[in-house]
Image (spheres, helix red, strand yellow):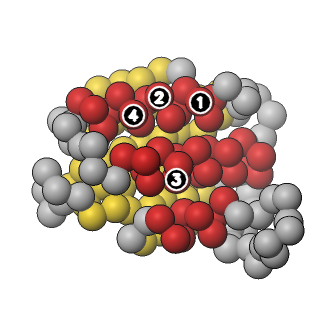
Amino acid sequence: MNAQPQHPYTREAFYRRDRRSVRLAREFTGDTLTEWGMAERGDDVLLCVSELATNALLHGVPAGRGFLVRLTLYSEGVLRVAVHDSGTGEVRTPDASLDAEQGRGLLLVAALADKWGVGERHPGKIVWCEFAVRE
């Protein structure tokens, strides 16, 4: 993990392809939210980071590569979580049944976040979600 300070309202950290990276991404996010004094919606944000990081590891990070988590707090009171990976593949909300063992991650993100989407990155993609928060 390599966390680098950015603009006062942007933090990012890079994680290698390793199962412990999801926990580290959650810790990074929790620490950042604490630093920014943002307890509001913290549980939702942490769950979404877990889901997006897990999806990056399972579906978006080729061997020998990693993923980036970027947190940005905009002056309009919006927190954006963006997970960048270098894998190919299309991101879509699965049609998970109640008895399915997998496939609920993006459904959770869609339910908890105010907005979510996918952006292009070369190589790879950026999966993001946003939360309205008070500063």
- In which image quadrant can residue 131 be found? bottom left
User: Looking at the picture, which amino acid does disc 3 mark?
Assistant: Cys
Image coordinates of residue 103 in percent, x first then y, are 77, 63
User: Looking at the picture, which amino acid does disc 4 mark?
Assistant: Gly
Question: Any mark on residue 23, and which?
Answer: 1
Q: How crowded is mark 4: few (under 14 residues within 10 Å), some or many (20 or more)?
A: some
Q: Which of marks 3 and 2 is nearer the N terminus?
A: 2
| Residue plotted at (77% across, 46% down) | 58
Residue contact at pointers 2 and 1, CB within 8 angstroms: yes
How far apart, in angstroms, are the residues tagged by discs 3 and 2?
Answer: 13 Å
Under circle 3, the secondary element is helix
User: Looking at the picture, which amino acid does disc 2 mark?
Assistant: Glu
Q: How crowded is mark 2: few (under 14 residues within 10 Å), some or many (20 or more)?
A: some
> Outermost residue, top direction?
2
User: Looking at the picture, which amino acid does disc 1 mark?
Assistant: Arg
| Residue plotted at (47% across, 65% down) | 112
Q: Earlier in the sequence, mark 4 or mark 1?
A: 1
Residue tagged 3: 48
Q: Which of marks 3 and 1 is nearer the N terminus?
A: 1
| Residue plotted at (52% across, 71% down) | 111
Residue contact at pointers 4 and 2, CB within 8 angstroms: yes
> Outermost residue, front direction?
99
Q: Earlier in the sequence, mark 3 or mark 4?
A: 4
Nearer to us in this view, 45 or 118: 45
Instruction: Tell me if residue 3 comes above or below residue 85 in the rendering.
Output: above
Residue tagged 2: 27
Question: Any mark on residue 30, and which?
Answer: 4
